[in-house]
Image (cartoon, rainbow, N blue to C red):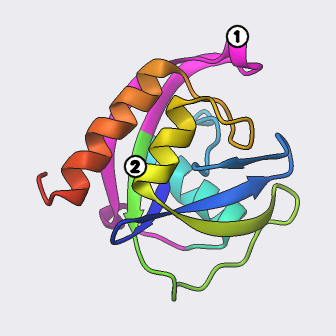
Amino acid sequence: FFFTNSRLTLLFYSLQTKKWDISSAGHVEKGKSILETAQCELAEELGITANAGELQYAFTIPAEQTPLGGCNAFEHVYFLHGNSETKMSLGMEEVSGVSWVSASKLLAALQNGDDNYAPRTKQYCEAMGSFLKKMLSGID
């Protein structure tokens, strides 16, 4: 889940990984939908209340994260459009700060494996790059 402001993307500092990350994420619990999980995680980690209609589907990819220290699953990626005026209340158990970065800087950091960012697979970076380019050019 990503929070965009024109050509900027919200990053937050993850206390779990000690790196900048671009997603508010969690595992889908039994009985909950993907969108319900997205809404819960946004509220828990960033204090943002969003209804399902505000979340824009981007892509789904297999998340083969075991080599990166995670687990294998599927990542369902949605964007939440907002701006820097949106009130946030950080879930201090998981997030210690936020920062805005340009989409191009973010993609370069992810594709180059910048150690300051949580690692992402090549497939994830490609899917994210394609979606951001479409979004920033106004194409659905």
Badge 1 or badge 2: first in the primary sequence: 1
| Percent of width and height locating residue 132 | 31, 48
Q: CA distance from mark 1 to mark 2?
A: 24 Å
Q: Nearer the viewer, residue 87 or 101?
A: 101
Tell me, yes or no, if residue 32 can be seen here: no
SS label for mark 1: helix
The reply to whether the magenta stretch includes residue 42 is no
Is residue 136 positioned above or below 54 on the image?
above
Write down the residue under mark 1.
Answer: 67
Q: Is residue 5 left or right of residue 36?
A: left
Please state which amino acid type lies under the numbered disc 1.
Answer: Pro
Q: Nearer the viewer, residue 137 or 105?
A: 105
Q: Nearer the viewer, residue 136 or 112?
A: 112
| Percent of width and height locating residue 105 | 49, 51
The quadrant in which residue 54 appears is bottom left
Neighbour tally class for label 2: few under 14, some 14-19, many 20 plus, Cα within 10 Å: some
Q: Is residue 116 left or right of residue 101?
A: right
Residue under the point 73% across and 21% down: 70
Q: Nearer the viewer, mark 1 or mark 2?
A: 1
The reply to whether the magenta stretch includes residue 66 is yes
Neighbour tally class for label 1: few under 14, some 14-19, many 20 plus, Cα within 10 Å: few
| Percent of width and height locating residue 3 | 47, 64
Residue under the point 42% across and 41% down: 77
| Percent of width and height locating residue 61 | 41, 23
Tell me, yes or no, if residue 43 can be seen here: yes
Residue 78, disc? 2
Residue under the point 41% across and 75% down: 82
Residue under the point 61% across and 45% down: 25
Q: Nearer the viewer, residue 84 or 49?
A: 84
Q: Is residue 122 left or right of residue 89?
A: left
Magenta segment, which residues?
Answer: 49-76
